[in-house]
Image (spheres, grey):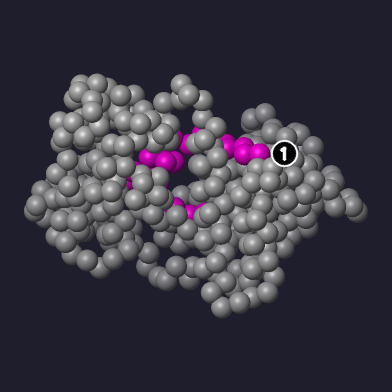
Amino acid sequence: MDALSDVLRAVRLSGAVFFDVRAASPWAAATPPGRAIVGKMFPGSGHLISYHVLIAGDCWAGPPAAEPIAMAAGDIIVFPHGDPHMLSSSPGMRTEADRSMYRPPRDGQLPFALSVGTGTVESAHFVCGFLGCDARPFNPLLAALPPVIHVRDRGGALGPYVQAALAESRVPRIGGDGVLARLSELMFVSAVRQHLEGLPEHRTDWLAGLRDPFVGRVLNLMHADPARDWHLDGLARTVGMSRSVLAERFASFVGRPPMQYLAQWRMQVAASQLRSSGDSVASIAARVGYESEAAFSRSFKKIMGVSPGRWRSQERPVGPRGA
């Protein structure tokens, strides 16, 4: 498994709540801070990612205090950090967000269909999607993403995903929630991949490290087998670099030494398993490379501030997802 896929799996990316919005100018639509609504939309998730796909027409989008971004049909805009933001028919327009809308559907039917604006002629048609994920203890993807990602997807992969999601939602079918969730995830992943492919050559962060022939290979090796007894010397020999050069190159992209990154990633994998499974702490410790439960517990507490057992009791949802 490559590093990006592994991160997406381990941070429990999930989402199936979205809005099908038709707007008539003048209009404005606001999305509140993710931290204010994620608990209602995705119980058990600690972070909200918002995205909007413009199907037809044009509009402006962005955080209230930033320069608005002009969007045309086929564009997608993503807010990876859950920042509040606005979409509108003209730049500078403001409105208040209705937080009561951001919830799982009571009747199980998606999307929420909305009409906004005071005009009589439709000027924009867009889909607003939301994803829940884990930001803690360690989500290198989120840390590498900017506050806003704007992707121009003229004839690309995103359009068919949106159309498939809308078609799936119009006629309720068995398994529809799962299909919509996967489509929502695919739209986000596609946007991230297009963002990655468009990064400038001089960019240095975790995402850019994935495409570096040396750092990317080290990341993929560690993510493919985090429990292995990795050492800097062995990784350097595998990729054909000296120990010192690899350490410097890795840190320049990822922001920390390879072994520190591995330790933090092991804690992310362990935390995910503590949340989602009833397996013993000892078995989870073994799966992330620790020979003893005591050594794992010490490392976990050093990074997380609490013991594995306390983390599990604090973070595990008290009820079924979406209840």
Q: How many marks?
A: 1
Residue at image location 28% in from the left, 59% down from the top? 273
Specify whether residue 143 is painted magenta.
yes
The residue drawn where x is 23% and y is 47% is 226
* In the foreground, 99 or 279: 279
Identity of the residue drawn at 10% across and 48% down: 295
The reply to whether the magenta stretch includes residue 136 is: yes
Q: Is residue 207 left or right of residue 147?
A: left
Q: Position of residue 215 (x, y in %)?
A: 32, 32
Relative depth, front residue between 275 and 311: 275
- Does residue 124 appear in this view? yes
| Magenta-drawn segment | 130-152
Instruction: Report if residue 37 is visible in the image.
Output: no
Q: Nearer the viewer, residue 256 or 193?
A: 193
Q: Measured along the vertical axis of the image, is residue 294 above or below residue 199?
A: below
Q: Amino acid at mark 1?
A: Met
Image location of residue 68, percent across then percent down: 69, 32
Q: Is residue 290 above or below residue 320?
A: above
Label 1 element class: strand
What residue would you read off at disc 1? 71
Q: Position of residue 6 (x, y in %)?
A: 36, 50
Task: Name the residue: 74% across, 40% down.
Answer: 72
Q: Is residue 141 left or right of residue 21?
A: left
Residue extending farthest to the right is 120
Q: Which percent across, then down, holds residue 23?
A: 80, 52
